[in-house]
Image (tube, helix red, strand yellow):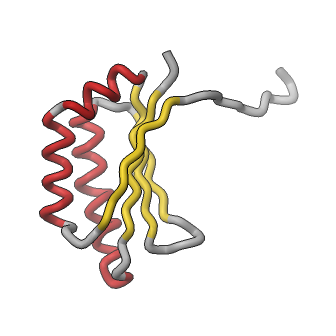
Amino acid sequence: MPAAYFVVRATVTDASKRAAFDTWYETEHVPDAVKAFGVAKAWRFWSLDDPSLHQAMYQFDDETKLAAMLKGDALKQLVADFNRDWPDVKRTRETLVLAQEFAKQDAGA
């Protein structure tokens, strides 16, 4: 089964709060989410086109594991923590399944 991804897009409109948000996400939220979700990989991004846009992505082994996480208490607790600490930050969530992975082959291979 292909990998599945959980993506959270947050809009931090107040520029003066972005550094604190970044620190909180890096030191608290991502480590908590990785542990709670049982994922091996997670990524965070800030948009180069719109500095208010932050995106986090968590990789699950497959859709079944992602679906179980979405129904579990871990997500509810992480959402509650986020709402407590960042009540003014709007978020959207998206689930994706890997359709293709492409990697340039080494010239010597």
Residue 104, relative to residue 79: is it above or below?
Answer: above
Q: In the rendered image, which quarter is residue 69 located in?
A: top left
**Percent x, y for residue 8?**
38, 51
Q: Nearer the viewer, residue 38 or 69?
A: 69
Q: How many marks?
A: 0
The residue shown at (22%, 45%) is 32
Residue 81, relative to residue 106: is it above or below?
Answer: below
Residue 16, relative to residue 78: is it above or below?
Answer: below
The residue shown at (33%, 23%) is 65
**Percent x, y for residue 78?**
19, 48
**Percent x, y for residue 34?**
29, 39
The residue shown at (45%, 30%) is 4
Judge from the rendering whether residue 67 lies leftward or rightward of residue 50; answer left or right: left
Q: Nearer the viewer, residue 32 or 92?
A: 92
Q: Residue furthest bottom?
A: 16
Judge from the rendering whether residue 90 lies leftward or rightward of residue 41; answer left or right: left
Q: Residue furthest top?
A: 1
Q: If the image is split into quadrants, where does the C terminus sit?
A: top right
The residue shown at (23%, 55%) is 28
**Percent x, y for residue 68?**
26, 25
